[in-house]
Structures are given as C-alpha cells and as structure tokens.
Amino acid sequence: MTKQRVVVGLSGGVDSAVTAHLLQQQGHEVVGIFMKNWEDDDDSEYCSSNIDFVDAASVADVLGIEIEHVNFAADYKDRVFAEFLREYQAGRTPNPDVLCNAEIKFKAFLDHAMRLGAEKIATGHYARVRFNPATGLHELLKGLDPSKDQSYFLHRLNQAQLSKALFPVGELHKSEVRRIATEIGLPVAAKKDSTGICFIGERPFREFLNRYIQKAPGPIKDERGRVLGEHHGLSFYTLGQRQGLGIGGVKDKGAQRGGGEHAPWFVARKDMEKNTLWVVQGHDHPWLLSNALSAQDASWVAGTPPAAGRYGTKTRYRQADAPGTLAVEGDHAFSLDFPQPQWAVTPGQSAVLYDGEVCLGGGVIASAAPLDAAKHPART
C-alpha cells in the first residue's frame, strides 16, 4: 500500500486509538482529530466530552501524532439533532447514529480532513471497505467480529465517502483490538465502550427529552380498550419497550397469546391522533409482530437500488439477518415482506439490506404491517 496522509477520528476510545496505531504500522502519515459534536451541557455529569478529549490527547501522545480539537456542534445541531427531535415529536423513534455518520463523520469531518490535505479518513468502526474491479464500485462489508459489526450504522454512506474511508479494526475481533492496545501501552486499553448516543450519554433518556419536547399525557390502553394507566407523552415511548411503563402491578388473568397473569407488558402501538399508548402482554403477541414494512428516504451504497428479490435484512442493530423480499418503489422507497414475522418493527428506525457480507444500503421504516392486520387495523 502506498503511504498516504490519513486523518483519524480519535474519539478517546480504544477502537479509534488502535485504528491510528495500525495505520502507523502500515507506514501512513497519521493525524488525529477529536470531534466535539455537543456542547449544550458540557458541565453535566453525563457529558464525557472533556474526559474523552483528554484520553484522545493521551493516545496521540503515546503514538507520537498530532491531534486537533474540532467543534462540529453547530453542524450536529442543524443536521442531526433537529431531525432527531422532529422524528420524536411525530411519534417515531429515530436512529441519530446513522444520521451522524452520514452527515457529520463522513461529511463535515471528511470535508475538514480534505482541507488538511488528507487522502483518506479513518474511524474505529467495525466494518470494511472493498473495491470491486468487476463493477468499479466500493462495497461496504460487515466487520469480521459478528458481535461488533457496525455496517448497519454506516449504510447511508455513498461511493464518494467510501472511496475515502478506512476501517482498520473491521478486520479484527474486539478481543484482539484490546490485546493490541494493552501490548503497546495505550492508556485507553481497558476503557469501557461508550453506550447510547453522544449527546445523551448515560443520562436517563426521558429526562433528556423533557427539556426539548413538551409532555402530553394520555391513556395507556390494552387490546380490549381498558385504561391501565397514564403515559407521559407518546414521544417518550418506543415499540417493544417494557421498562418504565408504570403498569407493572396490573395483571391480566385472561391474557392470551403467550401472555398470562405475570407476563410483562410491552408497548405495541402509538395512536398519535387519539394520544393513546396501546400495550399488550407477552413478548410474542401478534400486535408486536410484522410480516411486512414500507421504508422511505432510501440510500443505496452503489448509488442505485438493488434488484428486487430475497436479501438478508436488519430492522434493528443487534439482530441476526432475517430473510426479506425486496420490492423497490422508485429510487428512495421500498417495501420488504418477511417469511418469518419480525418483532417490534419500529417506524423511524432503519431497515438495512445485505447480500451476504455486503451491506447494500437501506431506508427509514415508515410503517409496518401487523400479523393480524385484518382483525386489528394498524395504529403505528
């Protein structure tokens, strides 16, 4: 590989630190950038940005590379957070990490790196890029560690972005990444992985949303229409949710479909028009299962939609690929039919398609068809 100037997004975590080291080992000229994407509550106990920058700077020091602190907070608020709030207010559950990758890490950050004379950028994502000479296209592949693969979050990247991207740790398992970090004495070798999305961190999610979205309480009802309690506002709940419903003491001795007297309650539907939260008992209740979905705002890695047919699909990050039949509806919309019903398919989340290890792209779930559509009209 020819020596290149590579700008690495150093987050203060172990994955990006090992990414920078591996690129050094390959002979590249490596420069680090720390991205600050949120600054509304820098002094909050939940915001780890300052600690992360200290860690990133420590890594740069050990590796002997330059690091620059760049503030993308304004871009983040305009391109990611505003959309995040719009979706929640509409009753959907967005995935800001997908948008952050497409709009910040591989747009604002990429543009900044190119201005610094970079030929490539690199991040600590568990994914891979491969150029296919037969098609002349760059392909996005799953990371080799199946438990860490992050191609789902990167599915909106296009050919121009992928042609500039490197994901060195995508070739490794997490255990190997930590081993390398320990071996070369990186200060973040044992640092735990960050959870949640960057601007929320470890804080209680409802408490965070309360600052931006007005509470609009309404009834919580079961499938028989009985009122079981009151919700805080439909924006604060997601399909399939079972914690924080405040109805744990309500039992239904007549519950069917995998339910029972002590079966947990799950959020099954959100009726925005009537401000009603519908819940059901039992993980496998038909209201929680879907045999089809429609998606919009599609983005395809190749630049054009794949042919109609059977593919592997994910409707949420941590799930095994499920077979689904694709029907394309123009460049930016599609539908999927599932031979095996899928659980808690959630509007606002991403439906992502795979051909084996190759991620083809995906779209935002607009609606899902419940199993018993004829009997119970969908209220998603």
Image (tube, rainbow, N blue to C red):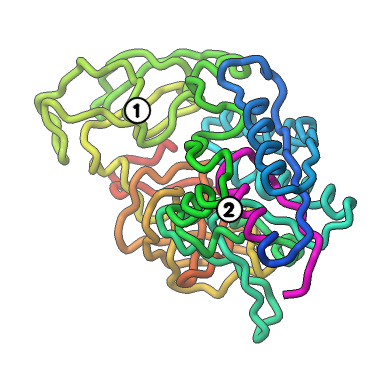
Q: What amino acid is found at the position of numbered circle 2 in the picture?
A: His
- Residue 371 image point, x, y percent: 30, 50
User: What residue is pinned by disc 2?
Assistant: 125
User: What residue is pinned by disc 1?
Assistant: 278
Residue 12 visible to an observer of this rendering: yes
- Residue 234 image point, x, y percent: 47, 24
Q: Is residue 242 above or below residue 313?
A: above
- Residue 184 image point, x, y percent: 57, 51
Q: Is residue 4 magenta?
A: yes
Q: Is residue 118 magenta?
A: no
In terms of secondary structure, where does tag 1 sit?
A: strand
Label 1: how many Cα within 10 Å (few below 14, some 14–19, many 20+): many
> In this view of the protein, which residue sits in the foreground, 336 or 186?
186
The number of callouts visible is: 2
Mark seen at residue 141? none
Label 2: how many Cα within 10 Å (few below 14, some 14–19, many 20+): many
- Residue 89 image point, x, y percent: 58, 27
Extent of the magenta region: 1-23
> In this view of the protein, which residue sits in the foreground, 47 or 316?
47
Q: What amino acid is found at the position of numbered circle 1 in the picture?
A: Trp
